[in-house]
Amino acid sequence: MRDPMGWRQQAACRGIDPEVFFPDGEEPAHGAKAICTGCPVRQPCLEWALSTRERQGVWGGCDERDRRRLLRQTRRSA
């Protein structure tokens, strides 16, 4: 059986403290987003977060606000 989240094995964030990707409150997520910038699996990570409506953290280089914006844009263009 194929692992639907097998992309995680190649993620640039693998082994990094998860707290970097889940900043407290209004703390900026610049560090996490910088790690995502060069990640080879950024797109599948973002697609997973969007499809599961992940509400917290940085996924695929996008924080919660970024993902909400992407979902709104997708709905408008549909």
Image (spheres, grey):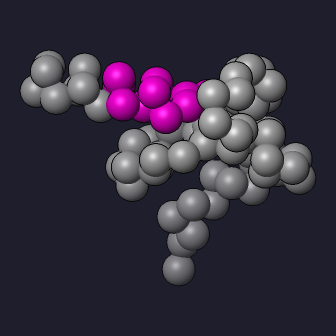
Is the magenta region chiefly helix, strand or loop? helix
Front-lying residue, 35 or 44: 35
Answer whether residue 76 is visible to the viewer in this image.
yes
Q: Which residues are magenta?
A: 61-70
Q: Residue at x 64, y 52 (%)?
A: 7
Q: Residue furthest bottom?
A: 1
Q: Is residue 73 magenta?
A: no
Residue occupying the point 63% across, 28% down: 26
Q: Position of residue 64 (x, y in %)?
A: 49, 34
**x and y percentages locating residue 74 in the rendered image:** 23, 26
Residue 26 vs residue 32: left or right? Answer: left
Residue 1: where, in percent of width, then height? 53, 80
Q: Residue furthest front?
A: 25
Residue displayed at 36% across by 31% down: 68
Q: Can you give x and y, in whole percent of width and height, for residue 77 in the image?
A: 14, 19
In the picture, residue 38 is in which quadrant?
top right
The residue that appears at 46% across and 50% down in the rendered structure is: 54
Give the image quarter of residue 32.
Answer: top right
| Quadrant location of the C terminus in the rendered image | top left
